[in-house]
Image (cartoon, coloured by chain):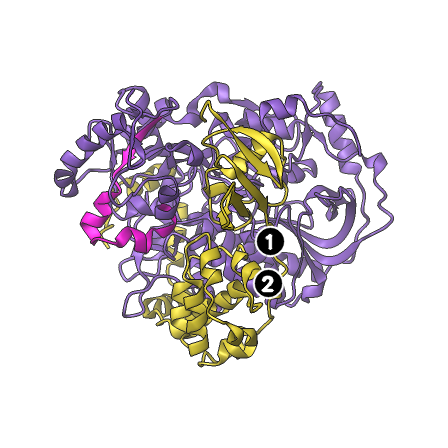
Amino acid sequence: MDMRFVDGYPEYMRRSIKKVEATREERISLVMEPMSAEEREELLSTYHPDHMKEGKRPLKIGSSKGEIVHQETANVLEARPQVNPDEIDLSCINHDVDILVIGGGGAGTVAALHAVYEGVLPENILITTKLRHGDANSMMAQGGIQAADGLDDDPSIHFLDAIGGGHFANKPDLVKALVMDAPRIIDWHQKLGVMYERGQDGHFVERPGGGTSRPRLHSAKDYTGMEIMRVIRDEARNLGLEVEEFSPVVELLTDGDAVTGAILMDLETREYGIVRAKSVILATGGFGRLHIQGYPTTNHYGATADGLVLAYHVGAKITDMDSAQYHPTGAAFPEPILGQLITEKVRGMGAMPVNAEGEAFVFPLEPRDVESASFIRECQERGKGIETPTGMLGVWLDSPMIEEIHGPGTIKNELIAMWRMEHQFGIDMSQDPILVFPTLHYQNGGVEIDVNGWTGIPGLYAGGEVAGGVHGKNRLMGNSLLDYNVFGRRAGISAARHARKSSPGKITLDHVTHYNSLLDEAGIDTERRSPMLLPDYRGERAIARSLNISI
Amino acid sequence: MGKNKISVYIMGKEHRVPEGLTIMKAMEYAGYRLIRGCGCRAGFCGACATIYRKKGDYKLYTALACQTTAENGMYLTQLPFIPANKSEYDLENIQAGPNAILSIYPEVARCVACNTCTKACPQDIQVMDYIQSVKRGDISRAADLSFNCLQCGLCTARCPAEIKHYHVAQLARRLHGKYLAARSEPLSKRICELEEGCFENEIDEMIELKTEDLKKRYFQREIKVSE
């Protein structure tokens, strides 16, 4: 291989870029057709990573025993709880509150704000979070948020898009709540001062995404998630909501039936704390950092499925956990940004996926699972991927098309986060295409909830990525920011109403003893402990030579 | 990951790491299990603010550890927390006039236009320019100029006038978004329709459909994605 680099790419990759440039003009006017139901089915069953049978197994224990989940998910569910009930003193309560919100990302913050709107005093709410307030996938969402407020759109069309994109496995009542609440969520954001892009007339600029039949994405450049998160966090601070940072929940507490509190651990001092609460809201996000099937991930450092594990320990059911979302456009090159997200807005604005020969091979706005499977087929079956210097495969995303279609300067204006990321590592995406390959992005399923965000366990509510049923087997772009707003809000309101009619409960760890006995009965003899809290990315040599001496 | 090793000095201590890693991954390679100073790992959260010098270079550089390649001879430390007070305010009771922000963050008036904040910004934001816009009462320009801010706090750590730039900018953006940006009429219309109970029946009817019929409807739906 010719390894001389020219403007960020080795010479041998430049030869493929030449082919992409040669077909660009022609492709701009090329109209690709979406796949039929049969074509989608065939492609997914052969090439989508979730259809690889060896990647999953049925759960041996718990309230969703028999459900098929990924090996990595089964590993954290079929593991010993981190906490040993004999070592915990439950007699000293550190926080006695109406509502405990577990997770300081989007869903948790929205839930806390709406609990306040519902009449709970801020001092009676505790938000606890593993890292900092706002450290969450919510901060990293780029492309936008769906809401059917356009003149040529309405919530029933949004409903059909979401349920078809989810392969008709979604819980319809949850989808209805999602699409019907959407315009009100945008209005709430508008009142809080979120800076969505607007035209001269005040109308929102709305763009299409994969699987949407109308342009419906409201965005704030490609920092949409960050813009919403920093605004709601600012509002939480203005209302005086207390946030315990670097204090993940390591186990819930119950009275034997209802959830009545939780055990926190200070990540730095390792001291535990006891919270008693009338209502508990799980808003811990998803499982990207479990690296399902060995995939790199777009996810936040803390996305280790903790909430799923906590809920399962107390007997909540899970749904659609056999389904992960691999975002089609993860960065495949250069190495330092491997797996990081290239927002779908790049395709929404006209960039086409193109193979090594410069050929278009798929409708650019298929739902994510279909688009991803087509990239995998192009690389693995058809041999038309581009190999990176470290042996990864990818396809081109022809970003310069955006400037051809919308005019020079569009990328730096509307896709500044993407431009900056590529530029930091030597690539100018307004001039050259970028190399992409599917990357683990989203937990489609999760803890079962009803339209009120209730998990079926008294006192326990959930919202956002930790919860399942909203997106079926595949989430559409722009429905996750919407999900955490809609179901964070609903969970917050429900938790507030439940707290009003409840009194503080008994706190025990009986469910942990019970869970341990389930593991024993099933013959699961394991050293694994969970929740995981953080992945371990230390170098192999450093781990191998690390001494476990207490100091 | 390159085969060649380089030396990075993490808080002064030398570690040999493969070349081509980001600063964050170099720290992990060396054996650090990060708790502070690591968040999204993708340039969106501002957790990994880092300051460094290079051997023989007088200049103090700033970076995001997850978005910067480690270099041989880098002396670095992370700055994972900045103790900057945020003012609490009720946005409903602020008039978005020229002095709105100055009355909440009066220290903005102390800006000596030294431009250190701008030089410190790992996002290449014109920080001093937006502070000057706030002084002039131009909220919308401050909102626009500060939009890419990740709130890492490096500007604030470097400022001789004790300005909390990133909190000031947050207020500017919210005031702009709430009071100064135009309003969307179609959204207001849609909310009225929802309050009248529109779309309930259409959706309930689809919920009642057999999956086969719903599928048919989905695959036959009209796709109009041109903007």
Image quadrant occupied by the N terminus of chain A = top left
Q: In this picture, which residue range is highlighted in magenta?
A: A393-418
Membership of A411 in magenta stretch? yes
Image quadrant occupied by the C terminus of chain A = top right
Q: Chain of mark 2?
A: A
Q: How far apart are labels 2 and 1 at the CA level?
A: 10 Å
Q: Amino acid at mark 1?
A: His
Label for residue A133? Answer: 1
- Look at 41% across and 73% down and name the residue there: B133
User: According to the colouring, which chain is yellow?
Assistant: B
Q: Is residue B165 left or right of residue B82?
A: left
Both labels 2 and 1 in a single chain: yes
Q: Is residue A291 left or right of residue B202?
A: right
For mark 1, give the secondary structure: loop
Binning the other alpha carbons within 10 Å of mark 1 as few (below 14), some (14 to 19) or many (20 upward) gives: many
Q: Are marks 2 and 1 in contact (CB under 8 Å)?
A: yes
Percent of width and height locating residue A198: 32, 64
- Look at 28% across and 70% down and name the residue there: A201
- Between A448 and A247, which is closer to the camera in this rendering? A247
Q: Amino acid at mark 2?
A: Ala
Residue A541 picture quarter: top right
Q: Chain of mark 1?
A: A
- Between A532 and A472, which is closer to the camera in this rendering? A532
Instruction: Find disc 2 in the rendering and name its residue.
Output: A236
Percent of width and height locating residue A238: 60, 68
- Rendered colour, chain A: purple
Would you say residue B40 is visible in this rendering?
no
- Look at 76% across and 51% down and name the residue there: A275
